[in-house]
Amino acid sequence: EAGVAQSPRYKIIEKRQSVAFWCNPISGHATLYWYQQILGQGPKLLIQFQNNGVVDDSQLPKDRFSAERLKGVDSTLKIQPAKLEDSAVYLCASSLGLAGGTTDTQYFGPGTRLTVL
Amino acid sequence: AQKVTQAQTEISVVEKEDVTLDCVYETRDTTYYLFWYKQPPSGELVFLIRRNSFDEQNEISGRYSWNFQKSTSSFNFTITASQVVDSAVYFCALSEAYGGSQGNLIFGKGTKLSVKP
């Protein structure tokens, strides 16, 4: 079974430029997550999708970050304009999306390492 | 509010030594899930184990074992006879079934384990 796919693996941009990351979840997984992992810290949730709807985007800096999952499968995370503090690894994860009251296991992709100069 | 504390920032052991990684969590929910993930230098988060709050049985999987104690809010991870391939950053994470954002993983800051030959 194929895992979570992400691209690109690495990206270097100048501040104020824009960047986009792509994620394709495990086949059949209804829930998709984007996490930001700053060096030396644990991942922090940015946004959670259930199919093509947003479940939680409370920690997404909406003035510069946006994400979509139009057809309920793959997803794109965009940053525009980028700031120096956005340098981090952006991880995508997916899970089956079980019914309420249950937390299913999230499986992570290899991540995209973003460097903002 | 939910929180995960991994007090050990870095641990260094010699191959074949046993090592225990500590994890202490805080939550107000009675139903929650605990996870351990491994992050090797390649960057991908690898799922190791998922436990729910009603199952306090310790678990063993090969050289890995987990000790869950609700009385002390701890979910410790032991590697027996460590190997060089165990070198990685290990994350403990918590997810509440009902409170806050269901399915949102709250990660600790991670423990970097170095196993030397």
Image (spheres, rainbow, N blue to C red):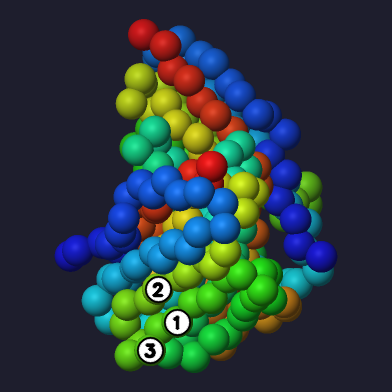
Task: Give the camera-side residue of B72 and B24.
Answer: B24
Task: Give the camera-side residue of A80 and B103.
Answer: A80
Give percent across and percent down for residue A105.
Answer: 44, 66
Within 10 Å of the Cα at label 2, are there few (<14), some (14-19), or many (20+) other Cα atoms?
some
Residue at image mark 3? A70
Give percent across and percent down for residue A54.
Answer: 54, 86
Q: Give residue A76's mark.
A: 2
**Residue at the location (34% across, 68% down)?**
A23
Q: Check the image and report above or below for A17 versus B68.
A: below
The residue tagged with tag 2: helix, strand or loop?
Answer: strand
Give percent across and percent down for residue B88.
Answer: 44, 31
**Residue at the location (36% across, 47% down)?**
A10
Task: Give the camera-side residue of A36 and A84.
Answer: A84
Question: Mark 3 and mark 1 in contact (Cβ < 8 Å)?
Answer: yes
Label whose residue precedes the other's in the sequence (2 or 1) = 1
Do discs 3 and 2 belong to a common subunit? yes
Label whose residue precedes the other's in the sequence (3 or 2) = 3
Question: Mark 1 and mark 2 in contact (Cβ < 8 Å)?
Answer: yes
Amino acid found under the numbered disc labelled 3: Leu
Q: Chain of mark 1?
A: A
The residue tagged with tag 3: helix, strand or loop?
Answer: loop
Residue at image mark 1? A68
Amino acid found under the numbered disc labelled 1: Glu
Image quadrant containing the N terminus of chain A: bottom left
The residue tagged with tag 1: helix, strand or loop?
Answer: strand
Q: Chain of mark 3?
A: A
